[in-house]
Amino acid sequence: MSTLLRNAIVLLLLLTAVTGVAYPAVVGGLGHLLFPHEAGGSIVERDGKPVGSSLIGQSFTDPRYFWSRPSATTPTSNNGASSSPSNQGPTNPALTDAVKQRIAALQSADPGNQAPVPVDLVTASGSGLDPEISPAAAEYQLARVARLRGLAQAKVRELVAAHTQGRQFGVLGEPRVNVVQLNLALDRASR
């Protein structure tokens, strides 16, 4: 075996060990040590049982719950195993049809609501797994959720405010409401 080939094999094995084993183990270990909740998937529990993640959106269709942003991953639910955008542009008839169907579903769940439907309730995000909606999307759904749960709108508005995060560092992104955590809080308030 030539020296050049032997050196190439040794370098391949060394880099495989460093970048494929040691580095991921160190980074994963530090992540679990410094950020155990996040490194563990940011799991949200109810009664000691995992019900979701605060980082991955879930599909809610029961009108008693706040609905999440639609997912492009599957027609009926958010599928964390296949995160992807829809790749449908504004001139694509399939996107127009999907938006019309989503608007119809929202209006069917709340027939008296004449407010304009916020865009994040009818369009999927780039990842297709957003766990949050805009405060406007929460406000659009607030009366329906309060009515169907028999709660005062003021109480539901308090829960929305408690689960609304502002801009990161005061300047990055937009205010947002975590839907999974809000819906769990609604379940607790309705008991």
Image (tube, rainbow, N blue to C red):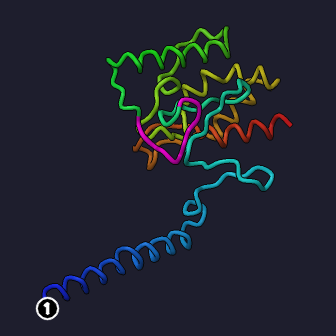
Which residue occupies 54% across, 25% down? Answer: 136
Total numbered labels placed on residues in the image: 1
Decide whether the magenta segment is chiefly helix, strand or loop: loop
In the picture of the structure, the residue carrying the numbered disc 1 is 3
In the rendered image, residue 103, in percent from the top left (x then y), is placed at: 54, 15
Residue closer to the observer: 177 or 41: 41
Quarter of the image holding residue 16?
Answer: bottom left
In the rendered image, residue 106, in percent from the top left (x then y), is placed at: 61, 17
Which residue occupies 19% across, 82% down? Answer: 8
In the rendered view, does 109 fall on the left or right side of 76?
right
In the rendered image, residue 77, in percent from the top left (x then y), is placed at: 58, 35
Which residue occupies 14% across, 91% down? Answer: 3
Residue lying furthest front: 1
Which part of the image, by quadrant, shows the N terminus? bottom left
Above or below 96: residue 72: below
Which residues make up the magenta segment?
75-85
Residue 143 painted magenta: no
Above or below 104: residue 155: below
Residue closer to the observer: 30 or 51: 51
Three-letter amino acid code at disc 1? Thr
In the rendered image, residue 47, in percent from the top left (x then y), is placed at: 81, 52
Quarter of the image holding residue 104?
Answer: top right
